[in-house]
Image (tube, helix red, strand yellow):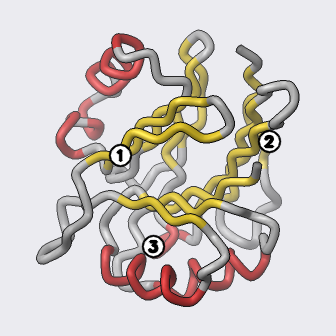
Amino acid sequence: MKILVFSDSHGDAESMKRVIRKHRRAEVILFCGDGARDFAEIRTMYPDKAFYGVTGNCDWYTDLPAYQELELCGKYIFMTHGHMFGVKNGLSRIIDMGRSNGFDIVLFGHTHQQLTSAEGAMLIMNPGSIGCDGEYGMIEIDENTGIVTATEYPRSDIPPLRMNTINS
């Protein structure tokens, strides 16, 4: 399963559309907040894909939740914007929450800085800002083996960087 991960579009729905067209095989789109209107716009354009999103600190008048807990291909995913976990001041709170609740993958935005790392068998990803920097992430889950591969896509003029493969 291919999963596109976006955050912080801040009014730039076009960048998300461009990336979705580039990765047509992605089945799921995850949005980590700050661009609820952009997220609503792209959802209507791609009815063949599953969409999950959360609200960010710059999203007003939206019915998106503050966080989502998902199960995809046997992996438990926690997604939030990150501001409620103080991610600009460190990741210990969001990592502790992920560990204590048994999540396989923790996704957040807010900092506009890409991050892909592993805390034991738990994948931590911030896809960066699609709207400000053109950054996003891709998570692939092998449905047969359960292996999770995460790839960061920095600005479009830089080739993608494969970061982590986690098998649990």
Under circle 3, the secondary element is: helix
Q: How far apart in space, not on screen, are marks 3 and 2 (Cα)?
A: 22 Å
Vertical position of residue 109 compared to residue 131: above or below: above
Quarter of the figure with the C terminus: top right
Quick check: 24 left or right of 106? Answer: right
Residue bearing mark 1:
68
x and y, in percent, of residue 42 in the image? 50, 83
Circle 3 residues within 10 Å: few <14, some 14–19, many ≥20: some
Q: For mark 3, what is the residue?
A: 132
Q: Amino acid at mark 2?
A: Arg
Contact (CB < 8 A) between labels 3 and 1?
A: no
**Comparing marks 3 and 1, which lies closer to the viewer?**
1
| Disc nearer the start of the sequence (1/2) | 1
Location of residue 111 with respect to 71 vertically, above or below: below
Residue corresponding to mark 2: 162
Q: Give the mark toward the camera: 3 or 2.
A: 2
Q: Is residue 35 left or right of residue 14?
A: left
Q: Residue furthest left?
A: 61
**What's the residue at 63%, 70% (across, down)?**
49
Quadrant of residue 65 in the image? Answer: bottom left
Kindly identify the residue that appears in the image at 79 percent across and 41 percent down.
Answer: 162
Label 3 or label 2, whichever comes before in sequence order:
3
Say if 3 sits above or below 165 in the image.
Answer: below
Query: Mark 3 to mark 1: distance in Å?
Result: 24 Å
Q: Are marks 1 and 2 in contact (CB under 8 Å)?
A: no
